[in-house]
Each structure stands twice: as structure tokens, then as C-alpha cells.
Image: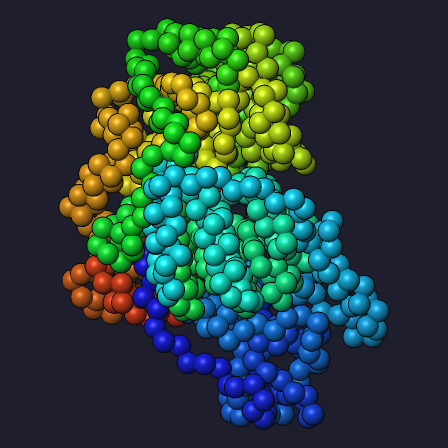
Amino acid sequence: MHPLSVPAIAQDTAPGIAAAFAQVLLDGPLAGSYTYRIPAGLAVAPGQWAVVPWGKARRVGVVEALTDISAITEEKLREIAQLLPELPPLAPQWLDFVRFAAGYYQGEPAELGLGSVPKLLRVPPSPRTRKRADSRLAAFDPTPGAGPTVHAGAAAPERLTPEQQAVLDVLTADTGHQPWLLHGITGSGKTEIYLRWFRHLLDGRSPSQVLLLVPEIGLTPSLLEQLRRRFPAEAVAVLHSEMPDAVRASNWMAAASGQARIVLGTRLAVLAQLPHLAGIVVDEEHDPSFKQQEGIRYSARDMAIARASLARLPIVLGSATPSLESWSNAQTGRYRLLQLTSRAGGAALPAVEVVPLRGARLKHGLTDPAVTAIQATIGRGEQVLVFLNRRGYAPVMSCDACGWLSRCDHCDAFRVLHRLGPASDARFGASKYRLICHHCASEAPAPKACPGCGNQDLAALGRGTQRLEEGLADLFPQARIARLDRDVASRRGATERFLAAAHAGEVDLLIGTQMLAKGHDFTRLTLVVVVDADSGLFASDFRAPERLFATLMQVAGRAGRHSPGAATTLIQTRHPEHPLFTSLAAHDYPGFAAGELRARQASGLPPYAHQALLLAQARTLETTLGFLQAAREHLLSFNPPPELSVCDPVPMPLAKLRDQCRAQLLVECGSRKLLHRLLAHWRGRLDPLAGTIRGTIRWQLVIDPVEI
């Protein structure tokens, strides 16, 4: 879906027209649009929030449309119980957007649209008293401690380089809908462009709102602080899934009412009601985290493009390593390309050096050149980032005597060894060590002896960030070391404390996973060491090299952003001759992208083809594959044209997850329109088909999958 082709959508019944019935969108079990009778004397309009009966309970939904026709006899219809005027009505443009996106992703508008609304807002008030409802709604009011806040003292903007000014001049001269791809090298000042463009949009008309989407929650604190400094008179709302319910509800209310003129959020923020939206920025647009992994598998980046198209708004996609789909669209003229080729402030890009691992003598996973470079950098009072995209202590425990491995009981994966406390006891069986599956989160104590043969000499294979931290403390006992990965970030306030210490110069060695690869600006950081760069070189997913290149380019770009002297990135690999590293050393994203696009075109892969995945899971793999095979035969019975390719069903790489056996069926087509027409017809047959299979089948249709 990149870019989306957005058709014209019919408007809802105009407010104020008398109607007998209302179509109400309801989320939850059996999500969909349901018909309710409008009570006499109740003025109802599309977009209003309503409480309706549902069995013996009540639900909160949104009036989608008004009608005088019902397929259900009137005596069987139930009435709307009440309206909720305290909740901001949803605009017709929002309803159009949700209906279009749900149609594209083969889902229900109610599930897609209302599923993004904070649950606290969808709790029906008590039917006996309004007191509980009033106290509940009081939590939604934006307050300095919970909702959008105003930060005193505007920060002086940075001085723009001529290149930045030229890009900004182009953006501010544009007045209509236009997708822009801003390709700027790391440290080139893309964020400064975003902030100045927002200022232009907010000053251009009143009322107006802007939306800034980021791929990860960890990127919101620093951006929020920048927004508050630069826009001290504007309320800023933040939307992401880890906010407390009342706080997220108050922020959503401020955005939906127009009180918050700036909205910062992760992928769910693309579905927020924004009545005065004037422009959108999608930062790190290449990041796969913009793809939803549960429920309707939408892409927030592509949905933002669709939303901008429907509303005829400008949108900026920013990245140092754009997705190949976006880069292809820029090359063909579908997007307009803007480029920043030099770093703001005059700093040079780091020198990228490839360090061979084959035959090297390693000290705690580091080669001699890496150890020497780290020692020299710390000696100069500068910072080092050691990057390893693997959390935990070790990926697996093993027994050399019988071959036992720490496999998960519920998944086709290994449980990872985790250290729960300081490394003061080397015995793996001590209570501070546990085995944790990173897929199903099941845990078990680390055994004192092999469960298979009783051997007490168990080994930890491989290296995670915890073990790397232990090794660096041994190699550099005087260095101040701090680690940031998902385990650390799960503790309240830990990310903020880590970043504050790093920026204050209280840390010499930063250890991190992908969480540190993008969006962070450390002024004293001059050396990056990538411990093991080979994980994505030979993966089965055709997008793996693109993701590896993006990650390495991003993490390399953390070095030397504010240093007038030399900065270096060392990449340890067993395949130094690989062309990916040649492009990386030259900071040549266009060359890398051109080679990848040629390979994809020759193979008929996106962006030169369009894909859908039918995923299924059941208790046994035989049941799962049987359903997918039946679904394949049913699709082929439509006599599809030759350009449609329907692959055989195969087990997923992680075939067993949480005791469910999973498989997939890939459908490809050169025509997006043809593919979606067939999928819409096929989707309606899948539930009846699942009912003919012995056993419980759960299935999901994924449009434009980002991982196969």
C-alpha cells in the first residue's frame, strides 16, 4: 500500500436530517456496524458517541450513519440508550478515513477506528446514576500533571545550513497535498526542519494541528522536550500504548477537541481524531515498527499517506535510510525527493571500518582493534557506544555431555538466559539467573544441572547485552558503564535516567540494542562498535538486507554528530567482503538501494508486486496446513488470471508459538486492484471454510506484509 490509491468516498447522511434508525460502530467481540432505533425527540448526527444495549450489557459506540431503511423488522430493533455529548464528535473526514483504511486492510471499521480510542472512554456510564460517569470523565480533563502540558521558556532555534534552508523553503512554499520524502544523512538536522515546518503550518491558519509519528515509544521523551521548548504557548498531546489509561484518555480528548495543536505519538496516533489537521511528519519512515502486529495489521506510515491524501494535506516522510518502497516512489515521481547530504554544524560522517571476525582472537566478543579503539576513546574523555542487538545474558544454555539445549516448552525457540542481578555469583543455577522465552514470555529457573543427564558443567552459548556488560566491566574496570535494552527500559523511569546520565557525561561506555540505534544525539560520542553485524545477512526474509543496512547506518550515525574531530564506527563481521558493507563504508544509501531494487525487480518482489499473507494457527500443524490448503484451493476455484500467484502453504519460521502451530499462505499479484478484488471475495469465505475443518482455527489476512 505504498502509495495508496484513495478513491472518492460518499459522505454520511448530513446532520440534522430526520431519520428513524442509526448505524452504530461497535468494537469488541463481533465488531461491526449495527442498526438501532432512534428514540423520539433525540437529535442524532453521524460522529456522535452513543450508549447502546448489547445483550444484557451496554456498549459505547459511534454513530456512523443515519437511515430510514432497516433490514431488521422494527419491533426487533433496540433503541439508543443515550448520547455522550461530553465526548468530542468524530468528524466525517475521520469516518471516511477509517472506512477506507479498513476496506484496504480487509477489516472492520469499528475494530480499526474504535480500537485506537482509549478504553477508558469506551466504558459506558452507570444506568442508575450519573455520579460515577461524572467522576470518570473528570480524569479526561487535561491537567499539567496528566494531560498535555505547556513548557515555559522557548529555546532559540538552531541556525540553518544553506541546504536546510533550501529544503524548508520548498516545504513552506507548498500549499496543497504532496507526499515529500526527506532523505537526510544522520545528523543532517531533519528534526529542525520538522519543527520549523510545524511553526509555519501552525502560524498559517487558526485553528490548525500537526501530527508527528515516531516508530518507538523510546523516541518520544526527547522529542516531547524539544517540542515543549520550541512551542511554549502550544499544548502538546502524546499518544502511545504504554501511557496510563487516564493520561492517555486526557491526551486523546485534547487532540480530538482541537485543544492540543501538536500531537506526538507512535503508530496508534495515526487513528486519532484531529479536527484541524494541517500536516503530518512520519519520522524514521522506514522502520518496520510502524506495522501493527496484532488485530488488523495496518501500516501507520501508509495510513498517514492515505489520511493526507483524503484530506488534501502535505506529508513529510523522513529517514536517513528510506524504505525501498518510498525510495522507488521518489525515483518515479510519485513522491517529491528532498535531500540533506551534509551534517548540520559542519561535523563529518564517521569513518566506517569493517573488522573481520574469522581467525580473530576475541576478548569478551571484541577484537583487538575494537578493544584498542575503546581504550583510546575513553582515555580522551569521549564516549563509546557498543551495539549488540541481542538482550539477555546468553541466547541459549547447553550441555556438552548429552546435547541438551534450553528449548522453550511452548515455542519452537530457545529460552534465553537472563541475569536478574549483579554478576557476583558465576553459578548459572543461582536464583539470580532465569531462562526466559522472548516469544511467549514463559520462564523457568536456570538449572543447576542438566535436566537430561545430570551434568553440572552447563555452558552459556553466545552473548547478549548482559554478558557483554559483564565483559566490558572486566576489560575496562575504570570505565563508567550503562546499558539500555528492553529489560532495562521496562523499569519505570529507567530510560530517562539512562539518557540523562549519558547526556550529562556521567557514562563512558554505552551498551545498547536497537533502542539506541536512532533518534538519540549524544554530544561526546565519537566511537561506535558493532559487536556482531551478521544476523541479517542471510535470513530467509527478502527484506533482511534492507533492515540490516538501515540499522547499521543508523547506529553508525550516532558517532561524531557534534565532534569537529574524527569519529569512527567499527563493524565486526565474518563476511567483510559482502557488498552491503562496501556501501555502508561509503555511506552510499542510493547505491545500496539501486542494487536492491534491481534484484527485487528481477525477482518480482515489492515494490514491483503486491502481496498478502493468510496466517493460520491451530493446535496441530496438520490442522493448520489443512485449512490453508483448502483456502488455497478455494481461491484457485475463482479461476484467477495468470498474474495472480498463490503459493503452497508452509509452516512459519517460528512454527510453534504459545502451543499453537502456525503456517502461512502467500498470495502475490502485479495488480493491486485485482489482488484486492479477489481478497475481498475470498475473505468472506474463510470463516465458513474454517468451520469445515476439524479443530479450532484462527486466521488473519495480512495486507502488504513486512515480514515473510
Q: Dividing the picture into quarters, in which one does residue 502 lie?
A: top right
Please state the horizontal and vertical placement of residue 35, each as a whole percent of the image: 57, 82
On screen, residue 389 versus residue 546, left or right, reads right
Please state the horizontal and vertical placement of residue 130, each as a whole percent of the image: 82, 72
Does residue 672 appear in this view?
Answer: yes
On screen, residue 271 versus residue 674, left or right, reads right
Instruction: Give 167 or 423, whichever is nearer the viewer.
Output: 167
Residue at image position (46%, 39%) is: 159
Question: Relative to 208, is 435 above or below?
Answer: above
Which quarter of the rendered picture does the N terminus lie within? Answer: bottom left
Does residue 286 appear in this view?
Answer: no
Which quarter of the rendered picture does the C terminus lie within? Answer: top left
Question: Relative to 595, is 258 above or below?
Answer: below
Instruction: Give 449 or 522, whichever is nearer the viewer.
Output: 522
Question: Relative to 123, is 2 above or below?
Answer: above
Residue at image position (58%, 59%) is: 261
Residue at image position (62%, 87%) is: 37
Colouring rule applied to residues: rainbow
Instruction: Give 146 or 113, whichever is nearer the viewer.
Output: 146
The mark total stands at 0
On screen, residue 332 versus residue 226, left or right, reads left
Please state the horizontal and vertical placement of residue 277, each as a whole percent of the image: 50, 64
Please state the horizontal and vertical placement of residue 599, each as a whole percent of the image: 18, 42
Residue at image position (37%, 59%) is: 173
Q: Dividing the picture into quarters, in which one does residue 53 lie?
A: bottom right
Instruction: Give 644 or 526, whichever is nearer the viewer.
Output: 526
